[in-house]
Image: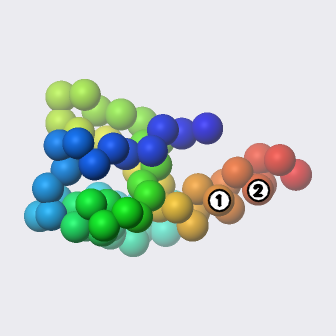
Amino acid sequence: MASILSKAGVNPGMSFKCCDCGDTITGRQVLDGDYLYIVAANRENPEASVFRCECCQDEWEERRHE
C-alpha cells in the first residue's frame, strides 16, 4: 500500500497532480483532510513526487485484489 501524504510541510499554495486521473489536489485540500497517496517519493523535491488521489487509490487497490 502507498503511503499517505502527511500534513507536515504542506502549505495551502502547493498543488499535487494525480498520476492516474490528472486531477489537481491543493495543499489546502490536504490540510483540510483530503488523502493523497505517495506512489513514488522524490526526497529532494517533495512536490515532484508521484501522487494518486484517494478515489484512484481505492480503484487501484480493488483491481489489485481481483
Q: Is residue 36 visible?
A: yes
Q: Residue at x 68, y 62 (%)?
A: 59
Does the residue at mark 1 contact the one at mark 2 (Cβ under 8 Å)?
A: yes
Tell me where residue 26 sits by quadrant. Answer: bottom left
Residue assigned mark 2: 62
- Is residue 32 found left or right of 58 in the rendered image? left
Q: At 23% across and 42% down in the image, what residue appears? A: 8
Q: Position of residue 56 (x, y in %)?
A: 57, 62
Give residue 5's position: percent from left, percent from top: 37, 45
- Image point 22% across, 67% down: which residue? 28
Whether residue 15 can be seen here: no
How is colour applied across the structure in the image? rainbow
Q: Secondary structure at mark 1?
A: helix
Looking at the rendered structure, the kind of residue marked 2 is: Glu
| Distance CA(mark 1)–CA(mark 2) | 6 Å
Q: Residues within 10 Å of mark 2 (few under 14, many from 20)?
A: few
In-image side of 2 versus 61 (left or right): left
Q: Which residue is mark 1?
A: 58
Give the camera-side residue of 20 and 56.
56
Specify whether 64 is left or right of 21. Answer: right
Is 26 located above or below residue 51 in the figure?
below
On the image, the x and y values in percent for residue 52 come to: 47, 55
State the residue at coordinates (42%, 55%).
Answer: 36
Residue nearer the viewer, 13 or 66: 13
Residue occupying the far top of the picture: 43
Marks counted in the figure total: 2
Q: Position of residue 33 (x, y in %)?
A: 37, 63
Q: Amino acid at mark 1?
A: Asp
